[in-house]
Image: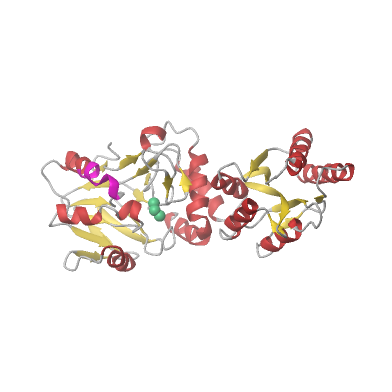
């Protein structure tokens, strides 16, 4: 695939993976993107997962013919991108590695090798001349590891954005240019909040630097190359990195052991829809993808947590869910609680305690406390909670 006249796509698609980063389901596979910038000197932008080395070499050789790369730029050392680096350096004996100081330390830690005599260490503001193309390096610490650099090609106005602006999904499913990806945001949001969400402040700092660049194309390390309507993607990233609410509406995240808490949740969801709340999403934390639930929690302006008391604590799936939120700096939400407990309800107190360190959270006045089955009193509590929420959207 041609990105510009001089920049070619040489990445690979992975349909064998079960869990990306040992954690995330990827039903549509995963792309490990790599690019060749062909000028008087040739630079390859990042390697690929170690299971795809031969396919990556074939893609490089197809684009370069009998030429050989002069540089490999390592923007990020996570093994989905650095897994073929050693093989590359063995295959192309004259090539040099261009990377940050921290990345060279990581190379030593991963491989016991940091390429003495074949390394070009770069930092914020450094440039690499390839001929007509000049690569400018932008430090992007914690997006998503500390060693990360992004790279801006001044000539073609391309930002190589490392993990930022990536998404789950192989390119032979979601489209190489994003043009036939009619819901980029869905899997990009799950990817962002799962992988980078904790580091919103650092990602925001990089976006501010990027705002000073004239960018016509974004080449991420995962997902499609972004060319059209870049303002759409930048605006979404601005919302996500500042923990802003993207969508007005309520997500109800619940666990239910025997169906009583679920019944309360379904009653609330139906009432919210009846009363015209703009969007209502419901997720069963024991059965649905937790990364999808995390994504929705960050997406909507309001969340209702509903769970049972369990071992004088809360049900394990809810515990994992709330931990997944708080470790990602969950903030800026309206939130409500539904608890269930047959003899000593504790869930509301435990959930509130887990969330008390989150910034700028507003609790609903109305709460629902169930003692096993949903009583008439509980129905009145649910009605009051629904009324309070509906009023918030008027
Ligand atoms: Fe795609 Fe942080 O690795």
Quadrant showing the C terminus: top right
- Give the main secondary structure, helix, strand or loop, of the magenta stretch: helix
Q: Is residue 211 visible?
A: yes
Q: Which of these two is toward me, 305 or 47?
A: 305
Task: Determine the residue positioned at 42% across, 51% down.
Answer: 21
Question: Quadrant of the rendered structure where residue 383 is?
Answer: top right
The residue lying furthest to the top in this view is 180
Point out residue 57 in the picture as x, y percentages from the top left corner.
20, 44
Q: Which of these two is toward me, 74 or 314?
A: 314
> Number of marks in the image?
0
Point out residue 76 in the picture as x, y percentages from the top left corner.
35, 57
Based on the picture, tell me whether residue 51 belongs to the magenta stretch: yes
Left or right: where does residue 222 sit relative to residue 381?
Answer: left
Point out residue 333 in the picture as x, y percentages from the top left corner.
68, 53
Based on the picture, tell me whether residue 260 belongs to the magenta stretch: no
Quadrant showing the N terminus: top left
Q: Which of these two is toward me, 65 or 79?
A: 79
Give the extent of the magenta segment: 50-57
Task: Determine the residue positioned at 74% across, 41% down.
Answer: 265
Q: Is residue 176 visible?
A: no
Task: Determine the residue positioned at 33% across, 64% down.
Answer: 125
């Amino acid at each position: 695939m041609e990105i510009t006249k001089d920049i070619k796509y040489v990445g690979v698609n992975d349909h064998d993976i079960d869990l990306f980063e040992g954690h995330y389901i990827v039903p549509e596979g995963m792309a490990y993107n790599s690019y060749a910038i062909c000028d008087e000197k040739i630079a390859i932008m990042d390697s690929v997962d170690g299971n795809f080395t031969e396919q990556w070499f074939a893609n490089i050789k197809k684009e370069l013919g009998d030429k050989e790369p002069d540089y490999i730029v390592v923007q990020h050392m996570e093994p989905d991108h650095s897994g073929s680096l050693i093989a590359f350096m063995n295959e192309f004996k004259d090539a040099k590695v261009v990377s940050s100081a921290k990345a060279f330390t990581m190379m030593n830690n991963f491989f016991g090798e940091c390429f003495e005599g074949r390394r070009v260490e770069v930092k914020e503001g450094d440039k690499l001349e390839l001929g007509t193309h000049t690569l400018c390096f932008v430090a992007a610490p914690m997006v998503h590891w500390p060693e990360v650099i992004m790279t801006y090609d001044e000539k073609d106005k391309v930002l190589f954005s490392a993990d930022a602006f990536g998404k789950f999904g192989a390119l032979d499913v979601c489209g190489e240019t994003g043009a036939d990806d009619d819901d980029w945001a869905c899997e990009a949001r799950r990817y962002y909040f799962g992988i980078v969400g904790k580091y919103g402040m650092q990602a925001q700092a990089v976006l501010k630097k990027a705002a000073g660049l004239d960018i016509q194309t974004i080449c991420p390390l995962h997902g499609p190359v972004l060319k059209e309507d870049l303002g759409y993607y930048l605006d979404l990233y601005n919302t996500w990195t500042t923990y802003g609410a993207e969508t007005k509406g309520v997500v109800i995240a619940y666990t239910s052991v025997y169906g009583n808490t679920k019944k309360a949740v379904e009653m609330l969801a139906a009432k919210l829809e009846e009363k015209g709340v703009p969007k209502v999403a419901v997720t069963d934390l024991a059965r649905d993808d937790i990364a999808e639930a995390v994504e929705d929690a960050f997406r909507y302006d309001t969340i209702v947590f509903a769970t049972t008391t369990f071992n004088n604590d809360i049900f394990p799936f809810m515990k994992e869910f709330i931990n997944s939120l708080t470790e990602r700096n969950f903030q800026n939400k309206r939130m409500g609680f539904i608890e269930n407990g047959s003899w000593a309800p504790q869930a509301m107190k435990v959930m509130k305690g887990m969330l008390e360190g989150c910034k700028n959270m507003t609790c609903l006045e109305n709460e629902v406390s169930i003692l096993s089955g949903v009583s008439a009193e509980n129905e009145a509590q649910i009605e009051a909670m629904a009324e309070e929420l509906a009023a918030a959207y008027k």
